[in-house]
Image (cartoon, rainbow, N blue to C red):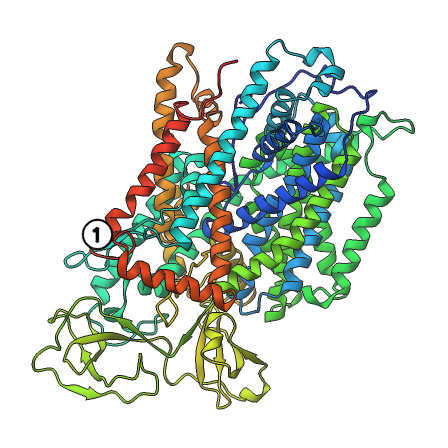
Amino acid sequence: MPTVESTSPTIEYPDIVGARPTNPLAAAFRPYVPASVRLPELTPLPLITGVVLGMLFGASSLYLVLKVGLTVSASIPVAVISITFFRLLSKFGLRDATILQHNIVQTAGSAGESIAFGLGVTMPAIMILGFDLEIARVMLVAILGGLLGILMMIPLRRALIVDQHGLLKYPEGTACAEVLKAAASKESIAVADKTHTTANAAIVNEEAAGGGKVIFSGFGIGLLYQAAMGAFKMWKDTPQKIFAAPFKAGSISAEISPALLGVGYIIGPRIASIMCAGGVLAYLVLIPAIKFFGEHTTGAIAPGTIPISEMSPNDIRGAYILYIGAGAVAAGGIISLLRSLPTIWHGLRGGLADLRGGHAVSANAPRTDQDLSMRLVIGGCLALIAIMIAVPTLNLQWNILGAFLIVAFGFLFVTVSSRLTGEIGSSSNPISGMTVATLLFTCLIFLIVGWTGPTYFVTALSIGGIVCIAASNGGTTSQDLKTGFLVGSTPKFQQIAILAGALASAVALGPILLQLNQASTVYVPATTFVPVSSQVASPFGVALQPFDEKLKPNESNYRLLKITNSSTNLDPGEYLVGENDQVAYKVKRNFPADLRVENPSQLPLEKLKGPQARSDQNSYRVWQRNDAEGAAAQRYLVDDQGVPVYLVDPGINGTHRMRPDGSAVQKFDAPKATLMSYIIKGILSRKLPWALVLLGVMISIVLEMSGIPSLAFAVGVYLPLSSSSPIWIGGIVRWLVDRYLRVKFRHRNLSETEMIAEGDKSPGVLLASGYIAGGALAGIVIAIMQGGPARLVDLSKRIEDWATAKNPFFNGANADLLATFPFILLCLLLYLVGRDILLRPKPA
């Protein structure tokens, strides 16, 4: 695949990952398609294709940012898919797309990933702050931020893209132009400027087609693998090992997903290893230490609600480690912002200087210098601002200060993002840092004017979300316009295409976000019963009590066994003993029995949704309980007496990964959304579980003092080890491929940066992108099915029951080991493709 070399600095924990090739060009420039030539460009099929691809890659990016806090650059994969798709159509007698039509596809298709990132790092924080995730609010933030970022970037095009050509490199934009030129149609080659023609057109066309084959293969493999594992339960999705004494509560696990493997391959071994090291600290140091020191305490230690002696590793993580990890992420994010301030300041100064010095459009501008009307741009911005302050959903109604902050921070960071994207590329653009800065300054201003009530949490988050999406989309738009500048596209047609792509993606991604959350929501009753897998008899000499509580696992008669120490084969806690004197269930108390809410009649009514609604059709009062110590807010369904019946554990940032009937659900940890919520809560309410949060802050400071990037490590502490370990494995595969490349290119005396560029050019990056897209889309469908129609839920439960009883790869003594075999094959395929052994282009 024709690409060019990389000189971009490595960011400590990127927001967007992908190939990062660059190409510093000389100032003397003529576009591939001259301004005097008119080719088919903004036509229906390429625009629709781009919009659809944008929604697909946006959905996969949303899945990824909710899982691990980053997205994958869609520009190059969309360009390659467009080339392959239209080349295939031409073989059936249809017209092949021109290079300008391919550019429209790529432009419209790149918007989804930016919007997905902004939504995934801001909107889930609403639930942590104690509010509902409403569809109107999510879609408004996505639409307003997406369109505002594009419109604000349009006046910067001539200053940044045209006047700074040869100085601002725009890595992804230049790489996309190279891909499009390499695979240009015969019609495009015939009218191209002769300085761009190549004697090796047949070779580069074959390479471009080969790149498409690699991406489609990766997409298909990722989709089928995830479907076989997640939907049909062919093998266990998260093999794990929990250690016993003397290393009690220590555990290792891996979510053997193609998407996470692909992420690890793309970000490389260094960041992947640092991230996984954070998970090792959490699961193999902190959790065993908490278990060791707290096992003999008799009562619960806040913010936990049950004694540590009764906690599993996941219980300890939910009660304590999440807050330590959140503190580490918050500190790492702020340190990352401070480190990025010189870069952001440099980008701001340069962008404003470029804007002042940029040339104005002439009355008779050539085709390649025609933007959308400035009246339309300014009018569109004013209309969007009017919508922001008119609708009550965003808590910005007639809030002039809020609107001013959005305009000020929006234009500031769109300018910064657009310029930094040109200097260091999207993969090194600190969008998270800009969002943190927006929230910090917004919350400090709110604090000064006295706006500290809970409703202002939503106001601050709405401002941060809109600015985050605008800055992200501004950078993406500038990359797309750079591609169009190089290939000779008409800017106004590109701007229409990306506006259409952004609008469609914003409309699609909002419902997907809500559905992912709702489908994985678990209604947790006050008491649940966990089956005891091994045959354990009731200990001799321990008294059994009658069990006459209303909630029971089934209609059988049970007696209650209370274990207060570890002298038996059972951990401390409560158990149910059957009539055969065998221990059948462990009793788990999910919230305090004395929990109550006053005046429940004033609370809104709600019914259960999803699969659990079939067993309980009653209506309950909704109680949003804010923790007095600043822990995450909790949502309860209470009866008319104010007694909680269910804890509503959300799909995003929830901790209960199993429904009461034993069916597993997929949770999304959204680490960067947690960072945003803690900034808002820490400044406006000044209530957080500070003891645990400060432990996390100190972890980040120690890492920075040791010269280790703290943010990647902190995200690893916050995420489950099962999420970061497959990313580390992907990084190891990339390290092995890079070792081979060092041997292959040892005669060329390449620098370290040039060797990284060679790794980015390997087909392994394209296959990994396919793994991510296919695996993530399958994961979205499976997650939605878990909370979908009754027939699908029943089918899924029957498949899971069959696999539990009959499939040794899914359940049994050796299931954890056997489940790793398909994943090993997936890793081996990625390695072989990265080394050009499989799926390599045929020599022309």
Is the residue marked by circle 1 packed among few (<14), some (14-19), or many (20+) residues within 10 Å? Answer: few
Q: At which x and y percent is residue 360?
A: 85, 30
Which residue appears at 47% of the width and 70% of the height?
611
- Name the residue that disc number 1 marks: 814
Q: At which x and y percent is residue 506?
A: 66, 52
- Res 813 → quadrant: bottom left
The number of discs equals 1
Judging from the image, what secondary structure is the residue with disc 1 in? loop
Q: At which x and y percent is residue 250?
A: 24, 55
Q: At which x and y percent is residue 121?
A: 54, 53
- Res 327 → quadrant: bottom left
Name the residue at the right extreme: 363
826 and 419: which one is in front?
Answer: 826
Q: Is residue 459 left or right of residue 359?
A: left
Which residue appears at 53% of the width and 65% of the height?
127
Q: Is residue 535 left or right of residue 840?
A: left
Name the residue at the left extreme: 540
Which residue appears at 38% of the width and 16% of the height?
744
Q: Please indicate, yes or no, whether residue 265 appears anywhere in the rendered image.
A: yes
Question: Looking at the picture, which amino acid does disc 1 mark?
Answer: Asn
State whether residue 3 is above or below residue 154.
above
